[in-house]
Amino acid sequence: MSPLIMKMTSLAAVTAPKLQALGTLLARAFNSFTETRVRAAVPEWQLREIQHEIDRYHRMMRAGPLATAGGGNSSIAIPPGAR
């Protein structure tokens, strides 16, 4: 390999993790900024209700193919081949 190619390769190896770290930092900063604005704009009771719905859907997704179709009180089950 030529010295120029080796130098560019080592430069890319050093720069890539720094760029990834910068992207992570920017994503966290944006997330923090938007979370602060949402919390200021949405009432606390509504945030709890939304979080409850997210948790409920997450539990339904983890339950697998025999999860109930209409929620917790439904007696109708989705058969494995019906999707």
Image (tube, rainbow, N blue to C red):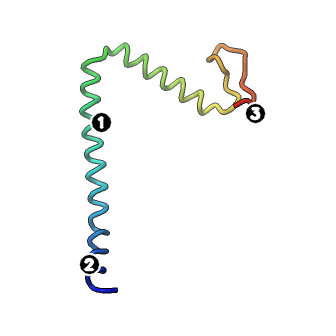
Q: Nearer the viewer, mark 1 or mark 3?
A: 3
29 displayed left or right of 57: left
Look at 49% across and 20% down and name the residue there: 53
Which residue in the structure is indicated by mark 3? Answer: 81
39 displayed left or right of 46: left
Q: Are marks 2 and 1 in contact (CB under 8 Å)?
A: no
Based on the displayed image, in which of its 4 quarters is residue 59 positioned?
top right
Which residue in the structure is indicated by mark 2? Answer: 7
Kindly give the residue lying farthest to the bottom in the view shown: 2
- Tell me how many marks there are: 3
Q: Nearer the viewer, mark 2 or mark 1?
A: 2
Look at 66% across and 20% down and name the residue there: 69
Residue type highlighted by circle 3: Gly
Q: How far apart are labels 2 and 1 at the CA level?
A: 36 Å
Q: Going from the N terminus, do you reach mark 2 or mark 1 first? A: 2
Based on the displayed image, in which of its 4 quarters is residue 63 positioned?
top right
Across and down, in percent, residue 70 comes to 64, 16
Across and down, in percent, residue 60 comes to 59, 27
Q: How far apart are labels 1 and 3 at the CA level?
A: 39 Å
Residue type highlighted by circle 1: Asn
Q: Are there few (<14), some (14-19), or many (20+) residues within 10 Å of tag 3?
A: few
The quadrant in which the N terminus is found is bottom left
Q: Looking at the image, which is closer to me, 28 or 7?
A: 7
Q: Is residue 10 above or below residue 59?
A: below
Which residue in the structure is indicated by mark 1? Answer: 31
The quadrant in which the C terminus is found is top right
